[in-house]
Image (cartoon, rainbow, N blue to C red):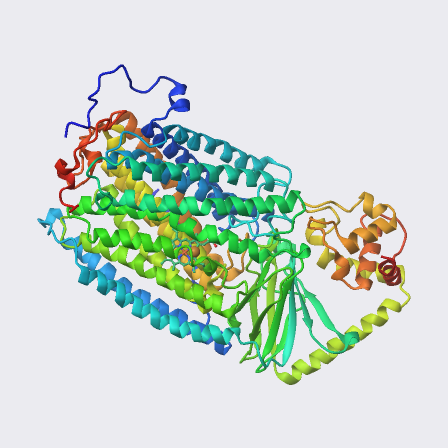
Amino acid sequence: MQTRLLRGLFALMAMLLGSWAQADWTLNMPKGVTDISQEVYGLHMLTFWVCVIIGIIVFGVMFYAMFKHRKSKGAVSANFHESTKVELAWTLIPAVVIFAIGVKATYTLADMYNTDDSELTVEITGYQWKWRYRYLNDDPNAEVSFFSNLATSRDEINNRLDKNENYLLEVDEPLVLPVDQKVRFVLTAADVIHSWWVPQLGVKKDAIPGIANEAWTIINETGTYRGQCTELCGKDHGFMPVVVEAVPQEEFDTWLAGKQEEARKLAELTEKDWTMDELMERGRQAYQTTCAACHGQNGEGAGFPALAGSAIATGPVEDHIDIVVNGVNGTAMQAFGAQLSEVDIAAIITYERNAWGNNVGDMVTPVDILNYNAGQ
Amino acid sequence: MTTATHDHDHAHHGPAKGITRWLYTTNHKDIGTMYLWFSFAMFLLGGTFAMVIRAELFQPGLQLVQPEFFNQMTTMHGLIMVFGAVMPAFVGLANWMIPMMIGAPDMALPRMNNLSFWILPFAFAMLASTLFMEGGAPNFGWTFYAPLSTTYAPPSVTFFIFAVHIMGASSIMGAINIVATILNMRAPGMTLMRMPLFVWTWLITAYLLIAVMPVLAGVVTMMLMDIHFGTAFFNAAGGGSPVLFQHVFWFFGHPEVYIMILPAFGIVSAIIPAFARKQLFGYSSMVYATASIAFLSFIVWAHHMFTVGIPFLGEAFFMWATMLIAVPTGVKVFNWVTTMFRGSMTFETPMLFAVCFVVLFTIGGFSGLMLAVAPADFQYHDTYFVVAHFHYVLVPGAVFSIMAAVYYWLPKWSGKMYNETLGKVHFWLSFVGVNVLFFPQHFLGLAGMPRRIPDYALQFADFNMISSIGGFLFGASQLLFLYIVVHTIVAGKPAKAKPWDGAEGLEWSVPSPAPYHTFETPPDIDKAPQLDRKEP
Ligand code: HEM
Ligand SMILES: [Cu+2]
């Protein structure tokens, strides 16, 4: 009996130790890959060690007293109870130490606020629950702008699949930035407050509707840097990661040129003749990234209205377009007209009207959406 | 001291019988008792929500609850703990102890006292009922930032707003009562600079409450207007600003955190001298430090908003002011330690909690100082590092001080002694639990885990599991606390009038349990032996 118990215990311990050995025991803030993040790390460690030293002194005296000055050891209490000199000392000395930290911190702060002389500006907009990145640029036909959605599958989140190593920290399309260049961020939000954070860059700034905040960074090393939204923004606050891909300047230039080309192509796509099958296929993909989180992978509705068999998805097409383009005020249903291309909106609506047994049979083309928008 | 006993002869009266005793009572002791039980009930309710949170966070992935409900749990947990557990507990202690400490027969405004308690259960019933409403309970965090709490809020937000109004009214009435009592009802000879520190800290807290609860009422009223009457205080589309919300909220919110800790300072300043058998070191500097903390607490609010993009000068000002607040806070800690130094200490349960308070509150103060450094706060803000910070100051801080107070004064309230062994077991379980629960959260925050998320990346898994285990241990230990208190009241051994040989203060000059009416004729302070160590 006893041996069995013991063996069980050992097995349990081995299991725990086994999983612990491969575990990640990160204790501290990352130093990061920018000058600012490294300065911040320095400030953090400075304040930390100041606290440790004060702690050792204060707790040292305290524990000494607790062991020596016990009644059970025959300690008799002294009766001093006041000393202006001592009080002054322990007011002034900490004040001086804090002053020193404050001076150093103020310099770093001033640095962080200096967004002058940037070579590239990226507009970051928070949406429930994704980020939009827009590279500011003079040519409106080739404007690069895209959404960055969580790429982790619902199956992983709901424990139906094993979680991959970047679980919840992966997106379909990362923000690509050049290294060694001052990049300015302009942050805002479309609905509620979000906050854009990449620990490795030492950048965190709130994205607030109606307000344009600024931040900047110069990344010193190429690599992939991951972060998350850090301001509670509703249901999927935990599911809107930030991924930054820092690449060498030439690679960035090529990438940006490619993106601009894509933007031009999209404009053309909107004009093209679409077949039902093409729209359904494109619609299925776009639906999964944009709509499935709320309406369910098969339109069954995940806490939000179901679309399979719904009055909107099987009713008059204008109402369907209206709700997708304009959203429903004050609910989680956003105005997707501002977020998705005409092609994607047309494809999604077509898909919703013809998938999961909805079989309405009609087809909505990008031109329909363009006309709808023009008529508004 | 004979003044303590019931030396009047007209036909009145012990407590009334039955339920009316509690409904109609104007007796500060009855009302104090009700506040304390109410607060404990809320502590268990808020604690249950915390257990749901820690259970969901035990492992990565969504297991028990959906994100919508998780957000309702974090919101309700925060609101109930702050407004339902901690604040009423301190008001309960104030009711019981302040009249007895200053030699007054009761609170100055006894009927208002009854009202300020009895509206609370309604406020919290209303708040809790939102859990069963269409669209669910408030889900926007205890800080309820607009527009998540206005344009995007569930319909139950209106009930939340009214609940906050009622709580605010209750707090304001309670605070007015305390100020009136302290300023008008002190026994002759009880000068301000002779008052026990608990009375001092409460006096200052009451002023803070009177100053900032109307601001809270204002901010929720502006929300109400935005939601139902078409204003746009916080709606950018209508010309308002979500940042305005945060300024108003934190102008209330930062003093609020000191409202939850100043009375704790008072409790610890009573308990440590009692068990060190040595007078409190630096009484007057304690008073001045409390007053300066209270003053500074009005000019540091934007340290909660370092990332919202306030201008550089504003940012720098709030950083400096916040760092400054660590100085008077430090003075308090140094005074407590020096009080212990060369004392003659014993470690009964109240002292264990008080000593633990000093150590762990100081750790919370250290992380506070780190958070005050604005550039570093860009990395800490809205991560588990902040969660660890405020739980260190609030749980082994405020909550432990309340527990210390209960163990310290329970013999006076009930006339019975608690079981010392069980008390110590409760302390050690809570101590281990609270550290296992909250210490790893520092690491989680530094490693990059945001707060208020129902699911997290894999590198946070291990510390979350440890934290949850600590949480379950801490939660379970509080059931032992309930048992100890009930057991004491029902079956404790009779307590002496002054069960702690080093205790000071008028409350120990009356019998245990304290008679229903005390100090109907004021005590003679100058002859009271407990106080003659303090110069007038
Ligand atoms: C040395 C004294 C203290 C300093 C310098 C300090 C500093 C700070 C700072 C800068 C923050 C904002 C962190 C952030 O959101 O990024 C913060 C948060 C907080 N502090 Fe303190 N603090 C101190 C003591 C206390 C005390 C005594 C309490 C309460 C008993 C307290 C309760 C809180 C709470 C509740 C929050 C978080 C509120 C929230 O966002 O939900 N702090 N503190
Ligand atoms: Cu604060």
In percent of width and height, residue A222 lies at 57, 79
Q: Residue furthest bottom?
A: A250
In percent of width and height, residue A254 lies at 70, 82
| The quadrant where residue B489 appears | top left
Q: Is residue B469 left or right of residue B235?
A: left
Q: Is residue B148 left or right of residue B532?
A: right
Q: Residue at x 75, y 52 (%)?
A: A327
| The quadrant where residue B337 appears | bottom left
Q: Residue at x 45, y 75 (%)?
A: A108
Q: Is residue B439 above or below residue B349?
A: below
Give the quadrant of ligand 2.
bottom left
Q: Is residue A22 visible?
A: no
Q: Is residue A48 left or right of residue B519?
A: right
Q: Residue at x 42, y 23 (%)?
A: B23
In percent of width and height, residue B238 lies at 68, 54
Q: Residue at x 46, y 55 (%)?
A: B464
Q: Quadrant of the C terminus of chain A?
A: bottom right
Q: Is residue B141 visible?
A: yes
In percent of width and height, residue B115 lies at 43, 30
**In the image shown, does B353 or B461 lie closer to the viewer?**
B353
Q: Is residue A185 above or below residue B135?
A: below
**In the image shown, does B194 or B253 lie closer to the viewer?**
B194
Task: Give the total number of marks visible in the rendering.
Answer: 0
Q: Residue furthest top?
A: B11
Q: Quadrant of the N terminus of chain A?
A: top left
**In the image shown, does B37 or B373 lie closer to the viewer?**
B373
| The quadrant where residue A56 appears | bottom left
